[in-house]
Amino acid sequence: MSGHSKWSTIKRKKGAADAKRSKIFSKLSKEITIAVKQGGGSDPDYNPRLRLAIQNAKGVNMPKDNIERAVKKGDQDGANFNEVTFEGYAAHGIAVFVECLSDNNNRTVSNVRAAFNKYNGTLGTNGSLSFLFDRKGVFEFTLSEGMDMEELELELIDAGAEEIEIEDENITVYTALEDFGNLNKKFEELKIEVSSAELQRIPNDTKELSVNEAKSVLKLIEVLEDDDDVQNVFHNLEMTDELAAEME
C-alpha cells in the first residue's frame, strides 16, 4: 500500500499549484452529473452518491457555481454516461487499472488503446487484474488544532478503519469496501470535513523500477489521466523516495 499512498501524496502536492485543476473540476462535474442521474435525484440528503461527489468537489475548492451547474445538468441533460473499466500492463510489467465515465464508448476504447500502444503497454481482458488490486474506501483529511488523534483513531477503528496513515497534518484512512458507508457516516457524526472520500483500487503488492523505467510508466499514467473520459488510474508501481524526489 505504501507505493499507492505515496503516489497520492505526490499528486496532492503537485495538483495544488497545477494547471490541471480545470481537468480535476471537469472530472468531478461529470461524477456529480452521473450521481444525479443514477443515484436518485438532485437532493444530496437523499442521494448518498451525490453527497459524496459534492463533498469531494468541495475538498478541492471547486466553485459553488460549478457544483450547481453539474447538478442542474444531471437533472436536465440527456447525455448518458457509462462506467467503463480497462485493465492492462504498462512497460516493465506494471499493472494499470483505468476507470472511465464515457458518453461515447468507441472514442474511449480508441483513446485508451492508443495510449497503451504508444507507451509500450498492452491491454488485457476485464478481470485479468482483479487478483492484484483490492477495492478499498480511502478518506483524506487534515488534522485540526486540538484534535485528539489517539481518541479519534479509536473512534475510526470502531467504525471500520483498517489502516490510518499520518504524514505531518495529512491523515489518510483506509477501510474495507463494505465499511465505506459506515466510516463516512462516522466522519459526519464527528463533524470532520474530509477533503476526499472515494473508493480506490489498492495494489496488494508494488513493483520497484529504476527511475528511468518508472518515468516511462508514469508517462502512460499521465496521458491516461489527461483524457477527459478517464476518472481514475490505479497502478502497482512502487513510488520510491528517489522517484518522488525526481518529480518534485
Image (spheres, helix red, strand yellow):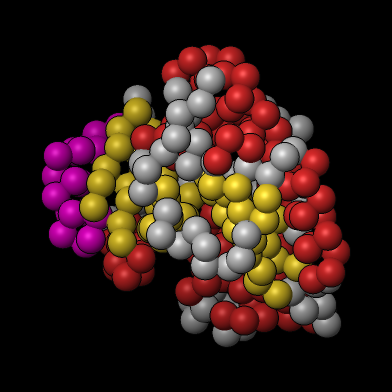
Position above or below: 199 against 236 = below
Position above or below: 88 against 118 = below
Task: Name the residue: 61% across, 25% down.
Answer: 213
Q: Using the rendered image of the protein, determine whether residue 100 is visible from the camera's viewpoint.
A: yes
Task: Name the residue: 30% across, 33% down.
Answer: 166
The reply, left or right, for residue 157 in relation to residue 35 is left
Instruction: Give the image location of residue 21, x and y in percent.
Output: 71, 40
Q: Using the rendered image of the protein, determine whether residue 193 is visible from the camera's viewpoint.
A: no
Please state, as top left, top right, bottom left or bottom right, where the N terminus lies in the image. Answer: top left
Q: Is residue 142 magenta?
A: yes
The reply, left or right, for residue 110 in relation to residue 237 is right
Task: Name the residue: 83% across, 82% down.
Answer: 78
Please state, as top left, top right, bottom left or bottom right, where the C terminus lies in the image. Answer: top right
**How many dots with numbers?**
0
Of 198 and 127, which appears nearest the observer? 127
Instruction: Give the image location of residue 223, x and y in percent.
Output: 75, 41
Task: Name the residue: 67% across, 29% down.
Answer: 216
The reply, left or right, for residue 21 in relation to residue 212 is right
Instruction: Give the image location of residue 115, x and y in percent.
Output: 77, 46
What stretch of residues is rendered in magenta?
Answer: 141-161
Of 99 and 248, which appears nearest the observer? 99
Position above or below: 185 against 76 = above
Instruction: Give the image location of residue 170, x and y in percent.
Output: 38, 33
Of 176 and 144, which appears nearest the observer? 176
Q: Is residue 145 magenta?
A: yes
